[in-house]
Image: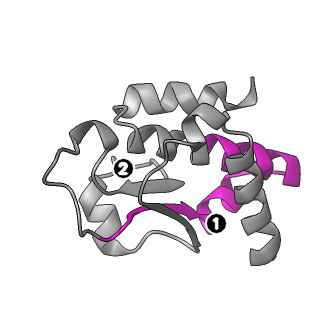
């Protein structure tokens, strides 16, 4: 899939997030990369056989305090190649991108992996 089309799918996923959450996104950038680099893979200690579709890197909102400031934005990366390899159709790619965007934004709000997985699964409701 062309990168521009994939990025539009990411934008669609973001647009579906309820306004009450979008309004609270603070100091975060969402980018698309082909796949995770070795540093990112090592950082998450991904179990064998699992695939990384997205990654949140930053300070979750619930851990920020008055000392938080003058920092680079948090970064959410959506990995295009693993999503494409996992999915059998453009509609499946759309759904997986949406779920992944919601999952990683849930981490920005402070959700642990279980809560973020729940957020991703609820993205289609």
Q: So how many labels did they put on this image?
A: 2
Q: Which residue is mark 1?
A: 80
Quadrant for the N terminus, please: bottom right
**Residue situated in front as seen by the camera: 52 or 16:** 16
| Residue farthest to the left, as pictured | 67
**What percent of the width, then of the height, locates residue 82?**
60, 61
* Above or below, 79 relative to 87: below
Q: Which residue is mark 2?
A: 48
**Residue situated in front as seen by the camera: 39 or 102:** 102
Between the C-alphas of marks 2 and 1, the distance is: 20 Å
Residue that appears at 29% across and 54% down: 44
Q: Decide: marks 2, 1 in contact (CB < 8 A)? A: no
- Quarter of the image where one finds residue 9: bottom right
Q: Residues within 10 Å of mark 2 (few under 14, many from 20)?
A: few
Q: Residues within 10 Å of mark 1 (few under 14, many from 20)?
A: many
**What percent of the width, then of the height, locates residue 88?**
81, 51
* Above or below, 10 relative to 99: below
**What percent of the width, then of the height, locates residue 102?**
58, 40
């Amino acid at each position: 899939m062309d990168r521009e089309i994939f990025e539009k799918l990411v934008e669609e996923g973001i647009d579906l997030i309820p306004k009450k959450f979008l309004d609270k996104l603070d100091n975060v950038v969402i980018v698309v990369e082909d796949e995770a680099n070795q540093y990112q893979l090592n950082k998450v200690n991904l179990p064998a056989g699992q695939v990384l579709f997205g990654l949140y890197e930053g300070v979750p909102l619930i851990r920020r305090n008055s000392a938080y400031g003058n920092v680079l934005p948090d970064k959410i990366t959506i990995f295009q190649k693993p999503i494409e390899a996992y999915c059998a159709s453009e509609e499946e790619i759309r759904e997986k991108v949406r779920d992944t965007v919601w999952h990683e934004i849930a981490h920005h709000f402070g959700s642990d992996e279980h809560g973020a997985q729940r957020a991703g699964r609820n993205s289609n409701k």
